[in-house]
Image: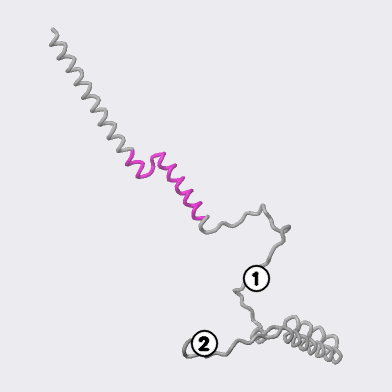
Amino acid sequence: MPRGGKKGHKGRSKQFSNPEEIERQMRAQRELEENGDVARDSASESEEESSSEDEKSQKRNGVQGLIEIENPNRVSQKSKKAAEVDIDAPRELTRKEREEIEKQKAKERYMKLHLEGKTDQARADLARLAIIKKQREDAAKKREEQRKEKEAQEAKSKR
C-alpha cells in the first residue's frame, strides 16, 4: 500500500542537504565577509574600524538586529567556579522548608503553653481530671464505708 493509504501520498518527499554542499556554501560566505571587511578597512579610518568591530560583535540574526531593547525580565544564568562557591554562606530556604519550620515552632509553642495549662484544651483536660479525681475519692469513701459496715455486721454476728 502506498504511503498515504488508498488516496496516495500528498506531500513532497524529504530532501536532505549534502554535507559537501553546505561546507562549500559556508566557505563562500566567509570569503565574501572577509573580502568585504578588507575593502572597508582600506577605505575607512581608524575610528570607523573600531565602530565596525563593535557592529560585528553585536551582529544579531533575524528580528534581534532590528530591536535594540532586551527583555528586562530575562535573567542570565551565571555559572560559578568551584573555588568561588562559598560553602559557609547561609542559603535561602524554600517556601516549603520555611513553612515546615514555622509549623514545628508553632507546635512547640503550643505544647509549652499546654504543659503550663494556659490553653483551652489544657484547661478542659484539667477540669476533666478534677471531676474524675472527685468521683474516685467518692467511690473510695463508699468502699471504705461498705467495708466498715461489713466488719461491723461480722462482729455482731460472731457475738
Looking at the image, tell me whether mark 1 or mark 2 is earlier in sequence order: 2
Colour treatment of the image = one colour
Q: Between 109 and 100, which is closer to the camera in this rendering?
A: 100
Task: Give me the residue at 46% from left, 49% from top.
Answer: 106
**17 drawn magenta:** no
Secondary structure of the residue carrying tag 1 is: loop
Give the image quarter of residue 37: bottom right
Q: Between 80 and 144, which is closer to the camera in this rendering?
A: 80
Q: Residues within 10 Å of mark 1 (few under 14, many from 20)?
A: few
Q: Residues within 10 Å of mark 2 (few under 14, many from 20)?
A: few
The residue labelled by disc 1 is: 76
Task: Give me the residue at 41% from left, 39% from top.
Answer: 115
Q: Quadrant of the C terminus?
A: top left
Task: Give me the residue at 26% from left, 27% from top.
Answer: 137
Secondary structure of the residue carrying tag 2 is: loop
Tally of marks: 2
Task: Give me the residue at 48% from left, 49% from top.
Answer: 104
The residue labelled by disc 2 is: 2
User: Eyeballing the image, is 92 above or below 7?
Assistant: above
Between the C-alphas of marks 1 and 2, the distance is: 50 Å
Span of residues in magenta: 98-125
Q: In the rendering, at what x and y percent does residue 138 appear?
A: 23, 28
Q: In the rendering, at what x and y percent does residue 1 appear?
A: 50, 86
Give the image quarter of residue 83: bottom right
Horizontal side, residue 91 vs residue 20: left or right: left
For the residue marked with disc 2, what is the amino acid? Pro
